[in-house]
Each structure stands twice: as C-alpha cells, then as structure tokens.
Amino acid sequence: MKSKLSLAMSRSDRTNPILTGQAVLPGFEFDVKSTMVEEIFLKQANEVCYDIAEMSLASYLIGLDRGETRLTAIPVFLSRAFRHNALYVREDSPFTHPEQLRHKRIGLPEYQMTAAVWIRAYFRHEWNVPAEEINWVTFRPERIPIATPAERADSDDLFEALVSGEVDAIMSARRPPSNYFPASGKGGAIRRLIPDVWQEERNYFKRTGMFPIMHLVSIKKETAEKYPELPNEVFQFMQKVKQESLNRVLETVQNSVSVPWMWEAAEASAEIIGEDVWPYGLKQNWEQIEAFIKYLQEDGLITRSFTPDQVFAPGVLNT
C-alpha cells in the first residue's frame, strides 16, 4: 500500500509531470496542490501544512534563523532567475541604469522575497548603490512577520503605483499586465529599466558564475523522520524529471513550448552555463547559497550563517 503525502508546487516543465501524475515516486502517492507560489509559501512558512512544498529560499532561511524546526529541505531549485529584467520604470522615465535610482522610491511586493534580496545585492555589489540609499516601498504584508526598513504602501497595486508616479521604479518577479507592458516589451506605459538587460544578465553570470536560486523544496521534518530515505528519493526523482524536461526542450521534432526560437535560446544557455543549465544538488550550489546567506545578513533579515547540514536534510548532503 502506498503512503500518501501532500505536495504543493507551482506549474513548470520541472513539475508538470509530477503534478499530473505522469511521473510517480515508487511507494508514495501525492495529494497534489497546485496554486500560486505566494499562497504555497505563506501556508508552508506559517502552518507547515504540506509534506513536500516549493518554498522561497529567503523565507526558508529567515525561518531557520528565527528558530523554525518543523521543516528541512533538499537542493532542488524549482525556480532560478536573473532578476535584472525585473526592474521596471515608466516609459517616459529618464532612468536607464540602476545607479540613477539612488534616493528614489522603488516598489516591491515584499521586502523579504528572494527576488528582492537578490536585487538589493545587485545594487550593493554590482551597481555601487547601498541599499540603504534607496527608499523601499512594499505592497503586501511580509509572509513571515519581520521588521524591515520599507515603507508600506497605501495601495496593493504595484503596477498602478508605478504608472501613477507613487514610486519611481518597481521590482516585480511577475510580468506587468499586458495593458501596461505588451508581449514585445515595447510601446507600453511601462518599460524595463536596463536597455540591453539580457546581455547584462549574461555578463553577470560570466563574472560571478551565479544563476540565482529563487525557490527550493521543503519537506516537513516529521515526514522526513518517518521516512528517512524520502529526502534523497525525492531529490533523485525530481532530478530525473528535470533532466527529462530539458531533453524535451532540446528535441527538435516538436517545439515543447510556444516560442519560435526556443532551441536557439536553449543552446545559447548551454554554451554559457554548461550542459546542465539548471543544476540541482548541494555541491554545485552551496557557494551561491553561502553568498545569498550573506546578502540576507546585509539586509538585516537574518543574524547568523548556516552550514549545509543546518539547511538541508542529512540524506542529500552528498548530492
């Protein structure tokens, strides 16, 4: 008889086979919950209501720092993204470089969200702008209640606040609505701050070797203790699903996504990043996680460093 586990993840090529039941973990049956990642994070961070769940890297580490003992994690990174492209300004804005945003008002959904931590790190370490010299404005409550230097906006519409002039720029992991930002990224009321942002992101990777991690996979510690082999089994299972997905993207007999030049992008990514363009595992990623921990400390969001065994389950420390 299979053991039933609750599982909550957003949809992507890395998770769809699991969420639809096409990919099966032997010995287990998943009670699948697929919804907005913000809802998953909020529930897992506060209620720990899923056996296995996608989780914000920043919120997970903030929880550990604040004494959270109900969760562990595996180095499966369901979301990775360069966030240079997440900075937006109004179409008529004079700003074209982050350095020009010193002392300006920048809107964020949440101060603690992983993408925002990366953006502040870019300002400090890439663009020579101390994060303390920017006036941060947030548009929703922090998922883990924590003191931040940000001002809380009166409204909850990040994009309208930019268009109306309430803020000078925004950082949004989500793409702006099409009525503000067309499919081409040009000709709308909102534009990206950095003109050649895709080249800027490639240059960042070449300088740092970092393809920024956004989300990992959390496991309820009670569940991991009940099934000691589960963390490594889930890691190996999701590694296999990811690799099969990458193989489908590269297969030219049929385009697996509705983007005409996807194969060009996939091959260019492999040329820059390497054959494994989306690496899981501790050995390939710990150096980056250590850097991110330092960024959280610089933000005042955590007070200490962590070792790999404090962040990840015992069964995945050799991955």
Image (cartoon, rainbow, N blue to C red):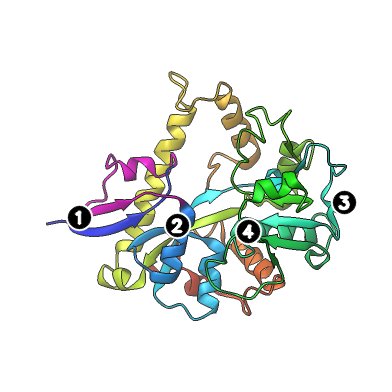
Residue 239 percent across, percent down from the top left:
41, 48
Mark nearest the camera among 2 and 1 is 2
* CB-based contact (under 8 Å), mark 2 and mark 1: no
SS under mark 1: loop
Q: Closer to the camera: disc 3 or disc 4?
A: 4
Point 59% across, 63% down: residue: 289
Q: Can residue 319 be seen in this view?
A: no
Residue 80: assigned label = none
Q: For mark 4, what is the residue?
A: 139
Residue type, mark 3 in image: Gln
| Kind of residue at disc 2 | Glu
C-beta proximity under 8 Å, tags 2 and 4: no
| Horizontal and vertical percent position of residue 39 | 45, 57
Query: In the rendered image, which quarter is residue 153 located in?
Result: bottom right
Instruction: Provide the residue span drawn in magenta.
Output: 12-36
Left or right: where 119 falls relative to 241: right
Q: Residues within 10 Å of mark 3 (few under 14, many from 20)?
A: few
Q: Which of 41 and 229 is in front in this view?
A: 41
Rounded to the nearest angstrom, the CA distance separating label 2 from label 3 is 34 Å
Q: Name the residue under label 2.
A: 39
Q: How far apart are marks 1 and 3 (CA)?
A: 55 Å
Q: Earlier in the sequence, mark 1 or mark 4?
A: 1
Mark 1 closeness class: few <14, some 14–19, many ≥20 residues within 10 Å: few
Compared to residue 114, the image places residue 211 above or below, namely: above
Reading the image, the residue beneath label 1 is 27
Position of 126 relative to 93 (above/below): below
